[in-house]
């Protein structure tokens, strides 16, 4: 494993923020100053293909990355853009239900809930206005 790939994995392992490739690049540059953004993108693609990280395509916010590769749901804050893991049971019946009803071969599903996170709600309460 290359020094660049190790640094990318370390950055992802140490955050729960579901960062963008650009954010990962800025963090990795602290340890590997000569790394290029294209190298970060290439390694993220390879790590995703190998199942070592997950790529999250969010509604309107681009692609983010997650070290947690277990199947799980996400919450995307409409205000600050934060993505949170949800500790909710996976609906294992939805794929079979939809396949039975439509004839489609469903092999996976992705669920992203949206709204306002607790931190942004607290900000609203303290300032008396929406952010």
Image (cartoon, grey):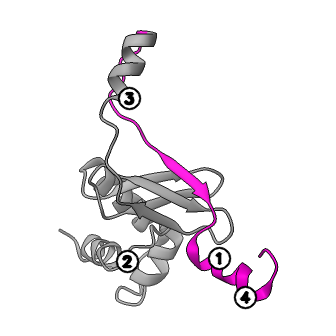
Decide whether residue 104 is among the magenta residues. Answer: yes
* Residue annotated with mark 1: 120
* Residue annotated with mark 2: 15
Measured Cα–Cα span from mark 2 to mark 3: 30 Å
Measured Cα–Cα span from mark 3 to mark 4: 40 Å
Where is the N terminus found, in terms of image quarters?
bottom left
- Which of discs 2 and 4 lies nearer the camera? The answer is 4
Res 33 quadrant in image: bottom left
Q: Residue at x 51, y 58 (%)?
A: 75
Q: Residue at x 39, y 73 (%)?
A: 16
Where is the C terminus found, in terms of image quarters?
bottom right
Q: Residue at x 82, y 78 (%)?
A: 129
**Taking 66 as reference, is 71 above or below it?**
above
Res 28 quadrant in image: bottom left
Magenta stretch in the rendered image: 103-131
Measured Cα–Cα span from mark 2 to mark 4: 27 Å
Q: Which mark is residue 94?
A: 3
């Amino acid at each position: 494993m290359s020094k660049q790939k190790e640094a990318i994995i370390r950055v992802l392992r140490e955050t729960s923020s579901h960062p963008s490739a650009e954010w990962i690049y800025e963090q990795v540059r602290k340890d590997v100053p000569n790394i290029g953004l294209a190298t970060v993108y290439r390694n993220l693609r390879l790590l995703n293909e190998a199942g070592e990280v997950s790529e999250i395509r969010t509604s309107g916010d681009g692609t983010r990355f997650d070290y947690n590769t277990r199947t799980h749901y996400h919450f995307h804050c409409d205000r600050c853009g934060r993505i949170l893991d949800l500790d909710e049971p996976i609906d294992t019946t939805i794929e079979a239900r939809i396949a039975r009803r439509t004839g489609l071969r469903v092999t996976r599903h992705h669920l992203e809930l949206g709204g306002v996170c607790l931190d942004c709600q607290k900000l609203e309460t303290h300032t008396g206005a929406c952010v």
